[in-house]
Image (tube, rainbow, N blue to C red):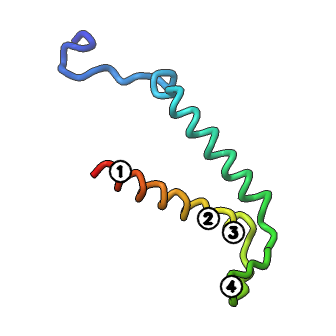
Amino acid sequence: MAPGKSGQEPRGGLRDRLTPGRVAVLVLGVLALVFIFENTQDVRIRLLVPEVTMPLWLALLIPYVIGWLCGRVLRGSRRR
C-alpha cells in the first residue's frame, strides 16, 4: 500500500517534530535547571515578622509566580 492512501499521514522524523518553538522551550528548560542547581544555598528571608530559610531559587521563584498571577488577573479584568 502506498504511503498516504491508508488515510493516515506518515509519521515524521525527529526533524519534523523539532519546531523552533519546541527547541526554545527545551533550551529555556535546561537553563532553568542550571539556574536551580547553581542556586541551592539557603537564604534567610524576613517578611514583616516571620523569618524563614529556603533555597535561593525558591525565594526567587515565589515573587515571579506572584507577579505572573497578578498579570493574569489584570489582563483578564481588562477583557471584560
- The amino acid at mark 4 is Leu
Q: Position of residue 34 (x, y in %)?
A: 73, 51
- The amino acid at mark 1 is Arg
Residue 10 figure quarter: top left
Q: Residue at 46% across / 22% down in the picture?
A: 16
- The amino acid at mark 2 is Pro
Instruction: Return the residue nearer the eye: 74 or 54.
Output: 74
Vertical order, 68 against 16 (above or below)? below
Vertical order, 59 against 75 (above or below)? below
Residue 67 figure quarter: bottom right
Residue 63 is tagged as 2
Q: Earlier in the sequence, mark 4 or mark 2?
A: 4
Q: Position of residue 41 (x, y in %)?
A: 81, 69
Residue annotated with mark 4 = 48
Give the CA separation, mark 1 to mark 4. Answer: 32 Å
Discs 1/4, front: 1
The quadrant of the rendering that contains the N terminus is top left
Give the CA separation, mark 4 to mark 2. Answer: 16 Å
Q: Secondary structure at mark 1?
A: helix
Residue annotated with mark 3 = 59
> In the figure, is residue 30 to the left or right of 74?
right
Q: Residues within 10 Å of mark 1 (few under 14, many from 20)?
A: few
Q: Residue at 69% across / 90% down in the picture?
A: 49
Q: Earlier in the sequence, mark 3 or mark 1?
A: 3
Q: Residue at 51% across / 22% down in the picture?
A: 15
Q: Earlier in the sequence, mark 4 or mark 3?
A: 4
Q: Position of residue 79 (x, y in %)?
A: 31, 48
Residue annotated with mark 1 = 78
- The amino acid at mark 3 is Ala
